[in-house]
């Protein structure tokens, strides 16, 4: 009897330990949100009370990075823990029209062969849900390319790219393969409500099963639409015109949607054992690039550049985490943390094995949540062949190594949005030139390049880039009709 009692308590304690070590995980991803667009990152007008509260209850990061400075590769990097070039996603993915592959870019997708954190968590026993903007394939909701369920999502509610025709009353959402038609409301609230409904049903069916939610907003990417009361609020306070007021309102609206999900997590009793991460897919769009971006009033804070740049603002984004069981309330961290780090970190949390048949580019960020240093084995690297410098599109490579930022141009190749069998030779022959080195601790705006004479950093980035290029996926060329 005594032995049975001891075994019972041992098993009970082990179950509790497993529960504590396997938290629920929620990733909230914005689209084109600038580093400086939130109240807690210094925006002078936009009010984001729920994210202010999330930061006060958790940790705010000042050196948080997306995997790429543009949407599709950023999302692929987040899901795979790999530089997106390895998966063959080099730029944003346009939809295939009429089901006909017209160029190699139409092949672009997150292939079934890639190993995703959603698949890993599902295999580890997590219930999984994706809601919002997918943008990881060209043939959305088609058997001809991989869809969210092929990457481990039990439930998905998504669009290929933007909410259409705008954030208001979109009509292009698909739920588990079935188009749902017009949905009344605003996209961020619609996506958050879907995740909330799924979580409540999950709680009813199996409250003890850990869950993973990937909530990917369309906001504040164009075409922006925002609730009239919020727009009116900003027309009176701080906004220079209605278009700017609509952008400000858009950010506050996604703040409220995030608060709704957090409230549900807390109400259902998951507060202490849930890691929530809030971030963005890349830096802000602005009024500079194209005419239809007339509501793109995102700001990048002190960082140089914008979306598409390999200077800081292209991929330095907001990063907030809340996990009451582990993260000290009101804490901050300035270590470089990347969405590439999600997969190895979540593997550690879920007790899952990391794949050994492919190169991963992230590292476990858990030490940072306890105020300790991250053991990053290699610097963060971005290779974007269609980057923008404010005037033109050029292929560039950038690296963050400690406080140092290195950037160079690729000479001998044209800017491109894809790499296929007809262009790979030119890409491989291109040379890194015009190196720039900045000490971000002293020069956050990347205004004054340091002398590269004698610095080991250019050679270090060269080696990392060569390794990446050798492992980058090459698509088949498509003959022009």
Image (cartoon, rainbow, N blue to C red):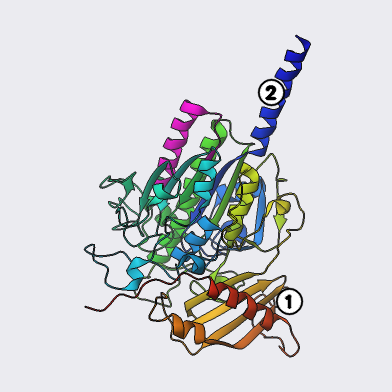
Q: Residue 164, how many percent across, how many down?
A: 30, 57
Quadrant of the image occupied by residue 289: bottom left
Residue to which mark 2 is pinned: 12
Tell me what residue is drawn at x 67 percent, y 75 percent.
Answer: 444
In the rendered image, the quadrant that contains the C terminus is bottom left
Up/down of 385 relative to 345, above or below: below
Residue 249 in picture, x, y percent from top left: 44, 56
206 in the magenta segment: yes
Residue 246 percent coordinates (x, y) = 40, 60
Q: Which mark is residue 21?
A: none
Residue at figure coordinates x 77%, y 54% from the top left: 372
Horizontal arrangement in the rendering, residue 397 relative to residue 190 (left or right) = right
On screen, residue 426 above or below 70: below
Residue numbers of the magenta segment:
191-211
Q: Is residue 129 left or right of residue 366?
A: left
Q: Which mark is residue 442?
A: 1
Considering depth in this image, is 476 or 430 the residue closer to the camera?
476
Crowdedness near tag 2: few (<14), some (14–19) or many (≥20) residues, C-alpha within 10 Å: few
Image quarter hosting the N terminus? top right
Where does the image place residue 396, in percent across and percent down from the top left? 53, 81
359 left or right of 143 in image: right
Q: Residue furthest top?
A: 1
| Above or below: residue 242 compared with residue 330 | below
Label 2: which secondary element: helix
Front-most of 476 and 175?
476
Give the distance between the C-alpha atoms of the residues marked 2 and 1, in whole angstroms: 53 Å
- For the residues labelled 2 and 1, say whether their Cβ atoms are less than 8 Å apart: no
Residue 406 visible (yes or no): no
Report crowding for label 1: few under 14, some 14 to 19, many 20 or more residues within 10 A (C-alpha): few
Circle 1: element type: loop
């Amino acid at each position: 009897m005594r032995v049975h009692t001891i075994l019972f308590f041992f098993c009970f304690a082990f179950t509790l330990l497993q529960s504590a070590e396997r938290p629920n995980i929620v990733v909230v991803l914005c689209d084109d949100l600038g580093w400086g667009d939130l109240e807690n990152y210094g925006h002078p007008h936009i009010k984001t009370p729920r994210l202010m509260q999330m930061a006060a209850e958790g940790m705010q990061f000042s050196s948080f990075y997306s995997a790429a400075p543009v949407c599709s590769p950023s999302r692929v990097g987040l899901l795979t823990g790999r530089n997106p070039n390895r998966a063959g996603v080099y730029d944003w993915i346009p939809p295939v029209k009429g089901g006909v592959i017209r160029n190699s870019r139409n092949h672009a997708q997150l292939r079934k062969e890639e190993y995703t954190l959603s698949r890993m968590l599902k295999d580890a026993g997590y219930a999984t849900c994706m809601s919002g903007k997918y943008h990881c394939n060209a043939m959305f909701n088609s058997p001809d390319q991989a869809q969210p369920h092929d990457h481990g999502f039990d439930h998905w509610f998504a669009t290929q790219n933007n909410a259409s025709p705008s954030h208001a009353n979109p009509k292009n959402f698909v739920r588990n393969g079935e188009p749902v038609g017009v949905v009344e409301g605003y996209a961020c609230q619609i996506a958050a409500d879907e995740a909330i409904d799924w979580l409540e049903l999950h709680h009813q069916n199996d409250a003890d099963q850990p869950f993973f939610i990937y909530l990917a907003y369309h906001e504040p990417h164009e075409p922006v639409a925002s609730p009239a009361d919020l727009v009116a609020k900003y027309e009176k306070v701080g906004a220079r015109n209605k278009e700017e007021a609509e952008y400000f309102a858009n950010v506050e609206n996604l703040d409220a949607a995030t608060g709704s999900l957090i409230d549900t997590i807390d109400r259902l009793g998951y507060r202490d054992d849930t890691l929530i991460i809030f971030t963005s897919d890349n830096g802000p769009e602005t009024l500079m690039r194209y005419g239809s971006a007339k509501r793109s009033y995102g700001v990048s804070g002190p960082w140089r550049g914008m979306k598409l740049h390999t200077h800081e603002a292209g991929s330095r984004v907001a990063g907030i985490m809340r996990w009451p069981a582990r993260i000290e309330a009101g804490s901050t961290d300035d270590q470089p943390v990347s969405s590439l780090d999600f997969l190895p970190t979540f593997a550690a949390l879920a007790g899952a094995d990391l794949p050994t048949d492919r190169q991963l580019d992230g590292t476990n960020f858990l030490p940072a949540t306890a105020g300790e240093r991250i053991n990053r084995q290699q610097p963060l690297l971005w290779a974007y062949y269609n980057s923008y410098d404010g005037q033109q599109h050029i292929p560039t490579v950038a690296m963050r190594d400690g406080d140092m930022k290195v950037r160079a141009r690729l000479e001998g190749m044209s800017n491109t949005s894809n790499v296929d069998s007809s262009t790979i030779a030119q890409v491989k022959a291109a040379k890194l030139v015009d190196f720039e080195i900045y000490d971000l601790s002293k020069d956050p705006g990347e205004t004054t390049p340091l002398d590269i004479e004698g610095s080991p950093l250019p050679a270090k980035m060269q080696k990392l880039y060569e390794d990446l290029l050798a492992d980058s996926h090459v698509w088949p060329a498509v003959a022009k009709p």
